[in-house]
Amino acid sequence: MIPKILVIDDEEHMCWALERAMKQEGYQVLTTTRGRTGLDLIREEAPSLIILDLKMPEMDGMEVLKKAKELNPKLPVVMLTAHGTIETAIEAMKIGATDYLAKPFDLDELKMVIRQNLVMSQLVSEVNFLRSELTKKYWKMIGESPALKEVLYLIEKVSSSNAAVLITGESGTGKEVAAVAIHKNSPRRDHPFVPVNCAALPENLLESELFGHEKGAFTGAVARKLGRFEMADRGTLFLDEITEMPLSMQVKLLRVLQEKSFERVGGNETLHVDVRIIAASNRDINSAIEKGLFREDLYYRLNVVHINLPPLRERKEDIPLLTSHFIEKLRPTYLVNGISNGAMKLLMKYHWPGNIRELQNVLERAAIISHSNEITVEDLPKEFQIGPAKPGADMVVGLPEGGISLEDLEKELIIKALEKSKGNQTRAAQLLGITRSALLYRIQKHGLS
């Protein structure tokens, strides 16, 4: 949308000059010489920004400013006056003015101030929207299984404290959902929840993302940048995939956790912030420590409270509730409102190596291709519809005298299926009566290449 500027100034020539200048910048412009008319325009036209003169007859700028902020507290207001003093500037800023220029002012400076305020207003709107979406969609964990109830109990207990929390679990089990739930149930709920994916950024960018940088700190640093620690002040910083953080960065993070202070990259000023840390990993952290990939002292700093999220295959009784939740979200877009008993039985039988995220993706795919308002067996991927493999004349399972563990038996069956299919994983999965993704999960579990 093209930003809409409202000019309220009792001098007609000033309104004309500002209208002309703002239109040249590509803005829509409304003007009035009366404060009361300006308030009516705020109600009717919903401007993006106001340029407001301080000294006006009938209703002065301070009164207009107060009433404008009552109508829209987030509306940027730039005050103009030929009678500016420090006292009036401070008073206007306290009421809610975002900037203050004294007449005669430099037109280029005014244009820059307007651009900055519009950008900041847009960013604030986007952040508020994303927070509201995050709150609505992601912070409630769905299910009634004993495994999930234990997780919810821990979340309830830990939320009221400031203790660091380490969340572990396979990919797709909802680690960020759990982190948001802790934040939303904590006294920090009205302050930022700031996520960082440690695996998505190279070491040099990760340091800048976490701690910020000063202008000129490195090539391309054309301005000061606030880091995620500063953004999360009085709120929660969520460090996802913490075991992927380089060792050199682990040292710096440990120092921040110990001293509760840091410096921006290229800066000398020591900054202090009040941030709660929640970290998450889908890897075995103890194994990473043994291999020298993760610092043991950092682990103890992060692992004050440990929450392990169960995989979906260990809480299958939650699948119907999760399915209903996802179908409800899909309903407005794809017009589905239910799932057949046959399709639900297949969902309950499946191993779900991709956990809740895989369930959501499967349901969305089914909703897209469905020809009715109900997801049926035919709408599910083919691997869901393949029945269990039946033993034939060439398949004999022998049981050694000394017995065999189910784990070893499963491994042996996978090896035989891969040999029989000559390494074709799709065919091997069909022979075993499981999906290809389930086969890949078991191959990885048993360390097979």
Image: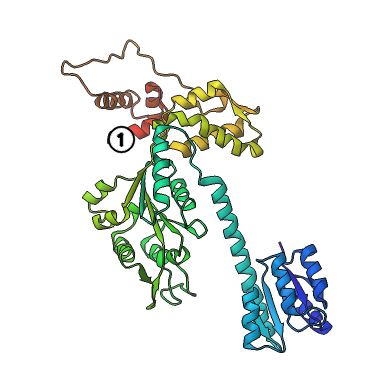
Q: Is residue 398 above or below residue 21?
A: above
Q: In the figure, 181 relative to 429: above or below? A: below
Locate the N terminus and report the quarter of the image it occupies. Answer: bottom right
Instruction: Tell me the quarter of the image containing the C terminus.
Output: top left
- In the image, is residue 426 above or below residue 202? above
Q: In percent of the image, x 42 and y 53: which residue is there? A: 160
Find residue 174 and report its image quarter.
top left
Q: Is residue 139 left or right of residue 401?
A: right
Image-based side of 191 in relation to 170, left or right: right
* x then y, percent, for residue 157: 40, 47
Circle 1 residue: 445
Residue neighbourhood size for the residue with mark 1, other residues' Cα within 10 Å, grouped as few (<14), some (14–19), many (≥20): few
Q: Amino acid at mark 1?
A: Lys
Q: How many marks?
A: 1
Tell me if I can see residue 129 in this picture: yes
User: Which picture quadrant has residue 392?
Assistant: top left
24 vs 271, nearest the viewer: 271
In front: 173, or 367?
Answer: 173
State the residue in front, 415 or 250: 250
Residue in the image at 57% along x and 47% along y: 136
Residue 98 visible to the viewer: no
> Which secondary structure, mark 1?
helix
Colouring method of the image? rainbow
Q: Position of residue 339 (x, y in %)?
A: 58, 26
Image spot of residue 294 (x, y percent): 27, 54
Dividing the picture into quadrants, the one containing residue 169 is top left
The residue depicted at 39 percent of the width and 26 percent of the height is: 429
Would residue 116 be found to the left or right of residue 251 on screen? Answer: right
Q: Residue at x 39, y 62 (%)?
A: 206
Give the x, y percent position of residue 111: 67, 78
